[in-house]
């Protein structure tokens, strides 16, 4: 599942969370619930925005299944073999 960074301008915090690509969090309360954090003094309805970090995806190779054979750069080459 991809990880995303969200920023809350009300408290100047950036929080990293995992969720499906089709999902999007819109406020501090949703973000805290997903991250397992207390909302603290920030209003739960304070807006958050997803930062343009591209999201990180864990490959099946790093999960230990061995299903994917990727080159050291982290991107899979055709046939699983790269010329590096």
Image (tube, rainbow, N blue to C red):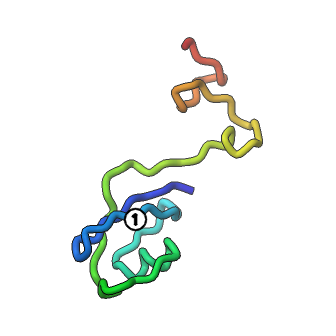
Q: Which residue is mark 1?
A: 15
Along the horizontal axis of the image, is 71 left or right of 25? right
Residue in the image at 44% along x and 51% along y: 55
Residue in the image at 36% along x and 50% along y: 53
Picture quarter with the N terminus = bottom right
Within 10 Å of disc 1 (Cα), the crowding (few <14, some 14-19, many 20+) is: some
How many callouts does the rendering have? Answer: 1
> Where residue 77 sits: x, y (%)?
58, 24
Residue in the image at 43% along x and 58% along y: 4
- Looking at this rendering, what residue extends furthest in the right direction? 65
- Looking at this rendering, what residue extends furthest in the top direction? 83
Q: Which is nearer the eye, 21 or 11? A: 11
> Where residue 84 sits: x, y (%)?
54, 13
Residue in the image at 51% along x and 55% along y: 2
- Looking at this rendering, what residue extends furthest in the front direction? 40
- Tell me which corner region of the image, top left, top right, bottom left or bottom right, holds residue 81: top right
Relative to 64, residue 8 above or below: below
Q: Element type at marker 1? A: strand
> Where residue 26 sits: x, y (%)?
35, 75
Q: Which is nearer the eye, 30 or 80? A: 30
Relative to 62, residue 24 above or below: below
> Where residue 21 sits: x, y (%)?
48, 60
């Amino acid at each position: 599942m991809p990880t995303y960074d969200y920023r809350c301008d009300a408290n100047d915090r950036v929080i990293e969370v995992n969720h499906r690509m089709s999902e999007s969090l819109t406020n501090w309360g949703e973000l805290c619930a997903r991250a397992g954090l207390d909302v603290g003094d920030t209003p739960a309805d304070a807006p958050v925005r997803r930062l343009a970090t591209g999201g990180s995806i864990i490959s099946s190779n790093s999960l230990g299944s061995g299903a994917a054979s990727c080159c050291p750069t982290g991107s899979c080459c055709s046939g699983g073999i790269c010329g590096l």
